[in-house]
Image: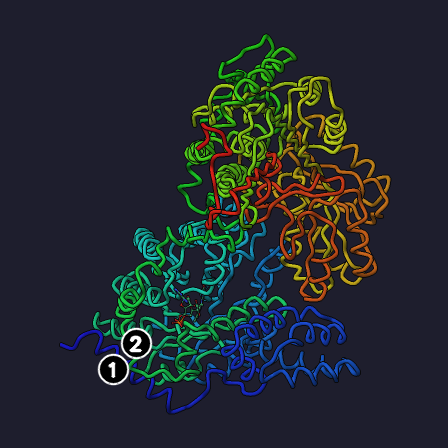
Amino acid sequence: MRSLQSEIEQHGARIFELVDQHPESLFSKAGFYQRMMALSMRDEQFKVQMFRFVDVLPSLRKSGDIVQHLEEYFAGMHNGLAPVIQSGVRVGRFVPWISAFILRRNVSGMARQFIAGKNCADVMKTLRKRHAEKIGFTVDLLGEAVLSEKEADEYAARCLDLLECLVRETQGWTDPLGKDSELFPVLNLSVKISALYSQMNPADPTDAIAHLAPKLRPILRRARELGAFINFDMESYAHKNITLKLFKTTFGEGEFKDWPDAGIVIQAYLRDAEGDLRDLINWGRARGTRFTVRLVKGAYWDYETIKSRQNGWDCPVYFQKPESDVNFEALSRVLLENESIVTAAFGSHNVRSIAHAQALADELGIDRSRFEFQLLYGMAGPIKRALVEMGYRVREYCPVGQLLPGMSYLVRRLLENTSNEGFLRAKFSENVSAAELLRDPKELVRQNRANLPEATIPTIAEDRHPKNGASIESPPGDIYENSPLVNFVYQETQEKMRTALREARNRFGEKYPLVIGGEKVWTDKLTPSVNPSAPKEIVGYVAEAGIPEAERAVKAARAAFDKWSRTPFEERARLLEGAAAIMDRRRYELSALEVFEVGKPWAEADGDIREAIDFCRFYAERMRQIGRPRLTQHVPGEESYQHYWPRGVALVIAPWNFPIAILCGMVSAALVTGNTVIMKPSEQSIVCGAMLMQIFEEAGVPPGVLNFLSGRGSVIGAHLVDHKDVDLIAFTGSREVGLRIWESAGITRPGQRELKHVICEMGGKNPVIIDSDADLDEAIVDSIYSAFGYQGQKCSALSRLILLEENYDRVMERLLSAAGSLRVGNPEEPGMMVGPVIDEAAYKRIQEYIEIGKSEATLAYQAKEVPPEGYFIPPTIFSGVKPNMRIAREEIFGPVLSVIKVRDLDEAFEVANGTDYALTAGFFSRSPADIDRAKAEIEAGNVYINRSCTGAVVGRHPFGGFKMSGGGTKAGGADYLLQFLLPRVVTENVARHGFAPEETPEYRDEFLGPAAR
Ligand SMILES: Cc1cc2nc3c(=O)[nH]c(=O)nc-3n(C[C@H](O)[C@H](O)[C@H](O)COP(=O)(O)OP(=O)(O)OC[C@H]3O[C@@H](n4cnc5c(N)ncnc54)[C@H](O)[C@@H]3O)c2cc1C
């Protein structure tokens, strides 16, 4: 008996033989496309620019804009295409429409390479041709991210229309093999699940299914009546579990339980694909009706790796290409071994993967009429032909739609065709030998492991924590690894959060003391902390400090200072790391508390705890970097060392909107630099403050070094700010209070030793500009999130959306319907986007601003339904806002967005910069020149290009503004700790009678005081 490998080689050789009978380049359409792709494979920089240009082109309306973009993207290039582009630009400057016309035609041609038709009538031309060639079809409607329920409903309606049209046009068509045809209906529609519900949130599968199933049922019903097959495509990993669950739920319902014409995709590049496939098969057996699985490797490899690296998640995909190939083969086996319940559709252009499936089917005695191969329209034509000639069933995946919604599909295909790792490139462009192409991928995995030094093969854990350099040249944020966000895509993490919420609820009403000098202090007053979603619920009570407790805290902090300031910085850094570890352990518990105490949605609450952990670890590392006295300059005969001493007693006053992160950030910076601290949380988040105190106590903070005072800002806050024994004030909060502190701290009181240093971070009136060529799918999603995420109660939140006249109507239409689809409600439920505002006072103040807005501008949108109980403000959008109106100038701190229409970019920048604030700002554009301008001109401490303007990550986005937004400090930045320190230099003449030591050490330790070495 011959081995499977030799059978695979036989099948593969036959395919290659047939392929070679009809030689065709990888790019069946010659000319422009072929040249572009060839160049892209040679020149990485060109590839990036070309993909970006292709991405923006369909959205450009004016010829002049097209020529300008062409110049911006390619002007600096020096390659084979440079002369062509330069002459295009030259012609374009004089007669823009000529170049624009040629470019549009060429790029449309490129898109037509992969998009089978604009609409049903158009695609039928292709389908008829393929039918004649004995190739079947599945049709996919392009248009992926839907921003609103209106767009989702339109997608569902288009699916139904397409079905009706296709059934009319394909009447009388029969199965090409004429055998086992009942398993393979002629009419086959592929559906993108995320296009059916705009608010799909991985944390909330129940909500997603409750919205998706009713939209799907009419499509399934009609498909069944028409004898059509429905396939669920698989998209990014975030949607995978919901898609699988939806499949099992809907096809498990009585109405569809006995319907076999349903399929779903499994992506072999996923590490958990086999578990999912086996689970589906068990489900299928229990259901008792056949179904189909299309096995692919997966189209989102780059996206998944980037996303997981950014968020610190375990990467769900394999890192080595042959690992995906090996898994594809393992899953092919699982599929074919379960042929009695599942029909296999192999979606691959890789001859090895295809030949493996063929050989395995032979080995298992499965007739070739009982499974099929599926390939994409516009790719691997010769392989399709070869498979048909060999008597296999072949189906082509035919995307239908306009160029604009098809762009992300097109870019994925371009990536696939030019990928260094891809089979098509290897076979058709690089002419790799058949023997090489048919090698067992297991061998390649083994070989890769043997060839690469052990250390360079990343494991998942290493990928999550890439090794960062810590040299002076490495970026300052690289000295540590950010803590991962919790990924709520997993059932396990969802369960943990639900359990934590239940447990947090059980602790409602607990009482917490002040902590002064290491002692628990109770006063005769307790402050209740209220759940803003249900104000009758008291989350907890904290003892309320008055002036006597404030005085006691200053004394305790002052008394502890001497020892703490001389404690080695390594020990202080370890205290922070200990606190971080405790927060990590209690992560869900702390997040749950935030959901109740300040109304944060799940992911926002988790982000806050992650940030607190990051602050601790980042500042610990920074302290190690700056802690040792360092030589200032090499000069013979003299040694000068600069080093830092702590300032003294620090008063930390924090806001409620990031109740643990900001408090912890300021406290940990003060502690690690050797200051002693009086920590005063916001009155609205006192339980979070008490919790942070517990954490530092458990981590071993010595008595008096950190003191917890909860009380009224107007009483204890004001008293402490003016206190002669407070040396440093770290404040984050409103402009009103911040400026008062700034002013008051400038007055020197009798007996005061130091000039008070104030670190002051205040609010913003943050603008986002959407340029005329921006990607609206992204710009609107990110603007909505920036404006309404956590109810707009972030100092970084978007509050002024600046739109150019040119695309004002287009943006507004989609923006308003996207806002209308937002989920508003109790954030205890997962996936809620807009929860309550913090308290009654905020509620009233925001309502007043809404009234002001109604009198100044036009109410363009306001949500109608919000929960009757709790401080819920409906997301509100005003249009017709002028820059001088109050709603465009004053910080509202709630879910209220002002839209300002401007003539052009000049005016947009002027408006953006025209307030008292300079905290965050956003700019959406695909014009390199406009992006450069935004980078240079926008006045804000944090400028974000083509992404949301909230969500700063420690070390990555040092955060803080200027003008009336702050004193120019950067929390989470490399130089933040310097704010808490006094620099000192000691210079010693080391020459004696003209003789000096030759070597001067880079670092010395003696200036830290005896205990500090
Ligand atoms: C009919 C059809 C339908 C499809 N439907 C879907 C769908 O619903 N969802 C979906 O996601 N994709 C889908 N695809 C796209 C498909 O995922 C890609 O076309 C496919 O992955 C290319 O694989 P290949 O076997 O043709 O080529 P190969 O060249 O053998 O494989 C390329 C693939 O290997 C994987 N890969 C690349 N680099 C690495 C690496 N460093 N480490 C590990 N793996 C790597 C990627 O998945 C890449 O696409 C479909 C494809 C077809 C043909």
| Residue 906 in which image quadrant | bottom right
Which quadrant of the render holds ligand 1?
Answer: bottom left
Q: Residue at x 31, y 63 (%)?
A: 453
Left or right of residue 695, residue 66 in this image: right
Relative to 992, does residue 71 appear above or below in the rendering? Answer: below
Q: Amino acid at mark 1?
A: Gln
Q: Residue at x 49, y 60 (%)?
A: 303
Q: Are marks 1 and 2 in contact (CB under 8 Å)?
A: yes
**Residue 610 is at least partly visible in this image:** no
Callout 2: few (<14), some (14-19), or many (20+) C-alpha neighbours within 10 Å?
A: many
- Image position, residue 150 (x, y; %): 65, 54
Residue with the mark numbered 2: 355
Q: Pick whichever, 173 or 233, lies toward us.
A: 233
Q: Pick whichever, 162 or 760, lies toward us.
A: 760
Q: Pick whichever, 723 or 787, lies toward us.
A: 723
Could you say whether the residue bearing mark 2 is in a helix, strand or loop?
A: helix
Relative to 962, does residue 15 appear above or below in the rendering? Answer: below
**Residue 582 is at least partly visible in this image:** yes
